[in-house]
Image: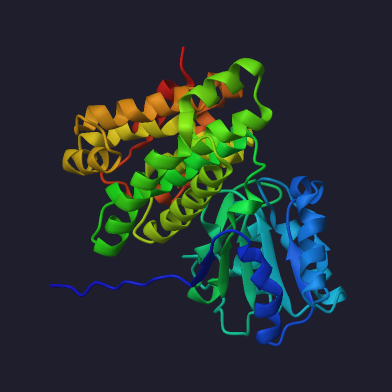
Amino acid sequence: MSLLRYSFPTQVLSGPNASDAIAGWLLDHGCKAPLVVTDRGLASLPLTPAFVNQLREGGVTPSLFSDLGGNPVKSQVTAGVEAYNQSGSDAIVGLGGGAAMDVAKAIALMVNHPGDLFDYEDGKPGALPVNQPIPPMVMVATTAGTGSEVGRSSVISDDETKVKKIIFDPKMLPNLAILDPNLTLSLPPGITATTGLDALCHLVEAFVAKGTHPMADGIALEGIRMVAENLRDAFDFARLQYGTDEEKAASKARLGDNNTEARHVEAREKMLNASMMGAVAFQKGLGVTHSLAHSLSTVCDLHHGLANGILMPHAMRFNAKAVPERFVRMAQAAGLSSATPDSFIDWLVQLQDQLSVPRHLKPAGVTEDHVNDLVHYAVLDGCHQSNPCPVSEADFRTLFHDAIGA
């Protein structure tokens, strides 16, 4: 009988105003000049200058790098390393969603390592070793989606081919993860929905992935429960801020007596933790949904969370025949009255409708003309290797056709 190897992530600080502790942590670790890495969109919002000022008031001298977008590419990492060196930085603070944190981790890796970023690609023959110091890293999640704040990898695309490459090493694990719900209270409904479904997809795919990892399975099931109990509330609170009059009235009626600021903060914190738990759980593996979604990002530049949110029911119908007992357990975790594979998939579809996420890819601009390229990149993606059943090229083609819709 073979031995099983488990690992658990880094220190996590969760709760309202958790970000207040970052400056003190940096000073305690001998760091006075952090490079704050975020994306262009977040940099343009009041949250980012307020965050930088908060660090400054805490006694450190931050610099800001924000030259990146939703699907980061290698040249942005190179520019970030240059910014780190020019500013005399001594630590990295990633602020944002998965893109910002992936770039932040890649910058931290390349500060002291020679060669090209893709020389460190996971699984690449002759890949260079990660054997030089990596500056201290603090990751601050501003969306409840990727869980990158506890990840040991970075997904970066080639500038020219747009192919996503995974840079992985245990030394890339951030030293501190910050889950501060106050940083997510102003997220609009659409981002709340798609990032929340992204978190759910990580939990679901990790639980059904082949292999044995009881810690990951337990974390995944608890995360599914937390999403089932909190995502709709977080979405409804977002609609109370940004929705139409009709949407506001519907959300207020559904929240009922739970329509309080305390409940909003609680829902956001629970979703941040569920997102983080998804990233812990998928140490076990992911699956076909992510291979489909990664291909959509490459070919159509589709937002990763939106892609996962649309694709998940289609992919899970494909998987349910392989591991039906796993779907029963997920249905139980989600609190469904009928615990069957069909009831769980029906629940995923209902969530799409409740969160105003389309059931098919066509409304997101994906057409049959894209299918050949989509299938090509999906087959190359490594995530489906841990899917509970094999996925052939023909299977990918069928899944994309079904997901695009009539």
The correct choice, above or below, for 194 with respect to 245 in the image is: below
The answer, for residue 147, to whether it is visible in the render is: yes
The answer, for residue 361, to whether it is visible in the render is: no
For this rendering, which residue is in front, 133 or 117?
133
| Residue located at (24% from left, 62% from top) | 214
The correct choice, above or below, for 84 with respect to 238 in the image is: below
| Residue located at (81% from left, 71% from top) | 57
| Residue located at (28% from left, 32% from top) | 344
- Answer left or right for 348 relative to 176: left
Tell me where residue 166 appears, x and y as whole percent: 54, 59
How many callouts does the rendering have? 0
Tell me where residue 331 appears, x and y as whole percent: 25, 37
For this rendering, which residue is in front, 28 or 8?
28
Tell me where residue 291 appears, x and y as whole percent: 45, 43
| Snapshot quadrant of residue 5 | bottom left
User: Coloured how?
Assistant: rainbow
For this rendering, which residue is in front, 286 or 121?
286
Looking at the rendered image, the quarter that the N terminus falls into is bottom left
- Answer left or right for 38 relative to 175: right
Outermost residue on the front side: it is 257
Outermost residue on the right side: it is 86
Outermost residue on the left side: it is 1
Tell me where residue 304 appears, x and y as whole percent: 56, 41
The correct choice, above or below, for 286 with respect to 379 in the image is: below
